Image (spheres, rainbow, N blue to C red):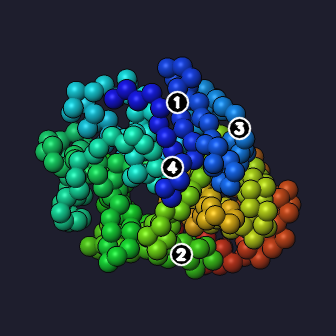
């Protein structure tokens, strides 16, 4: 793999091309026809213009945030790197362009990359128990077959996050199904399902969720609608904010949402999610756990995802609440509202708190 240029596509149309300005820095140029009637794929840092954009060195190791969203991290990267090593390739020597080529048309969101490096064919069956067993073997460095790795790369190699997961079509709909990671409690799937139900009760627009086989949490993909790919951009990519260490505050996140969507209703969605994370102890609220969708007409806040009890780094929220990272209070929430113009803040706080009854105390609820 030594790709010199990778072309970026959206719904069959060429968006532009990515090349390397040097060994570790990406450059991007929009296609002329896309400039005429397309949209900015990263509105704050890559406006529609006839110019060559150079990616900053940080925080994405010389890549642009929008393309970094496409490249799997965590579990997905582990799988891809195992597959590369199995084929005699040192992952450290694989360039940004090569990793985009490996994504091809299989990434989250709607962007596709050409030329694409072929991946193994998908398995004929979607046996969740077998896939979970194979995932655990790979995660714990136990012996696994080459086909097990190939199957999981095909089904989950484009996904991010620490927990093993696969992307499946079930009853004609596309789902993301998670398995247990080494540090998770045995009933993590049930816990995440309970959080999904609680999130809906608290007024969050959580996507359809199911508990498969009584233990595997699954959520219907919101980056797919009626078989069409939906453009998705994480807050991490939009704001050039790392998700690996705390770099973001909810004040900045809500103000960015207002600037992007021009809709206080969309910012209120993030305010409600912030309240949920605070009341129900989800401190893993880093910059990649918030996203925005573009459907061709307007930007909106995506449905929430990855909601579950989490201690966070050092017991603090990855995204601070007007500077408060540990044990934020309703007063902190109200200060965020005051600084971002959220008018219904007190009502939202009360609704989210009431959803969990006496359990909404900032400690573990399940």
Of circles 2 and 1, the one toward us is 1
Q: Is residue 256 above or below residue 219?
A: above
Q: Which one is earlier in the sequence, the residue at label 3 or at label 1?
A: 1
Q: Which one is earlier in the sequence, the residue at label 1 or at label 4?
A: 4
Provide residue 195's location: percent of width, then percent of height: 49, 70
| Label 1 Cα neighbours within 10 Å, binned few <14 / some 14-19 / many ≥20 | some
Q: Which mark is residue 9?
A: 4
Q: Is residue 282 above or below residue 49?
A: below
Q: Which residue is mark 2?
A: 198
| Circle 3/circle 1 CB separation < 8 Å | no
Q: Residue at x 83, y 59 (%)?
A: 340
Q: Secondary structure at mark 3?
A: loop
Q: Secondary structure at mark 4?
A: strand
Q: Is residue 22 above or below residue 345?
A: above
Provide residue 62's location: percent of width, then percent of height: 56, 28
Residue 359 in view of the camera: no
Q: Which mark is residue 19?
A: 1
Provide residue 153's location: percent of width, then percent of height: 29, 48
- Compare residues 282 and 161 and report the one nearer the observer: 161
Of circles 3 and 1, the one toward us is 3
Provide residue 265's location: percent of width, then percent of height: 75, 71
Q: Which residue is mark 3?
A: 50
- Compare residues 264 and 119 and report the one nearer the observer: 119
Q: Secondary structure at mark 1?
A: strand
């Amino acid at each position: 793999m030594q790709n010199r240029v990778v072309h970026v596509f959206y719904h069959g149309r060429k968006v532009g091309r990515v090349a390397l300005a040097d060994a570790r820095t990406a450059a991007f140029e929009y296609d002329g026809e896309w400039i005429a009637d397309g949209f900015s794929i990263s509105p704050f840092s890559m406006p529609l213009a006839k110019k060559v954009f150079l990616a900053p060195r940080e925080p994405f190791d010389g890549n642009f945030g929008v393309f970094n969203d496409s490249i799997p991290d965590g579990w997905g990267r582990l799988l891809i790197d195992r597959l590369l090593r199995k084929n005699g390739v040192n992952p450290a020597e694989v360039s940004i362009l090569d990793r985009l080529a490996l994504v091809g048309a299989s990434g989250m969101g709607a962007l596709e990359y050409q030329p694409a490096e072929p991946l193994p064919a998908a398995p004929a069956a979607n046996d969740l128990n077998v896939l979970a067993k194979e995932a655990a073997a790979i995660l714990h460095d136990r012996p696994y077959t080459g086909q097990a790795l190939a199957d999981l790369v095909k089904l989950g190699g484009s996904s991010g996050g620490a927990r093993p997961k696969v992307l499946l079509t079930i009853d004609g709909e596309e789902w993301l199904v998670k398995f247990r990671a080494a540090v998770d409690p045995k009933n993590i799937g049930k816990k995440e399902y309970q959080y999904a139900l609680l999130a809906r009760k608290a007024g969050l627009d959580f996507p359809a969720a199911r508990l498969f086989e009584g233990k595997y949490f699954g959520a219907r993909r919101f980056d797919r609608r009626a078989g069409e790919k939906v453009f998705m951009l994480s807050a991490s990519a939009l704001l050039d904010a790392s998700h690996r260490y705390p770099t973001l505050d909810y004040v900045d996140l809500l103000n960015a949402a207002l600037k992007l969507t021009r809709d206080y209703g969309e910012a209120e969605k993030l305010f409600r999610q912030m309240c949920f994370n605070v009341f129900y102890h989800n401190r893993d609220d880093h910059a990649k756990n918030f996203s925005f969708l573009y459907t061709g007409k307007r930007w909106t806040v995506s449905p929430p995802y990855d909601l579950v009890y989490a201690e966070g780094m050092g017991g603090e929220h990855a995204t601070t609440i007007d500077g408060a990272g540990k044990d934020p209070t309703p007063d902190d929430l109200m200060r965020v509202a005051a600084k971002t113009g959220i008018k219904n803040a007190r009502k939202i706080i009360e609704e989210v708190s009431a959803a969990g009854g006496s359990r909404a105390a900032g400690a573990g609820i399940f």
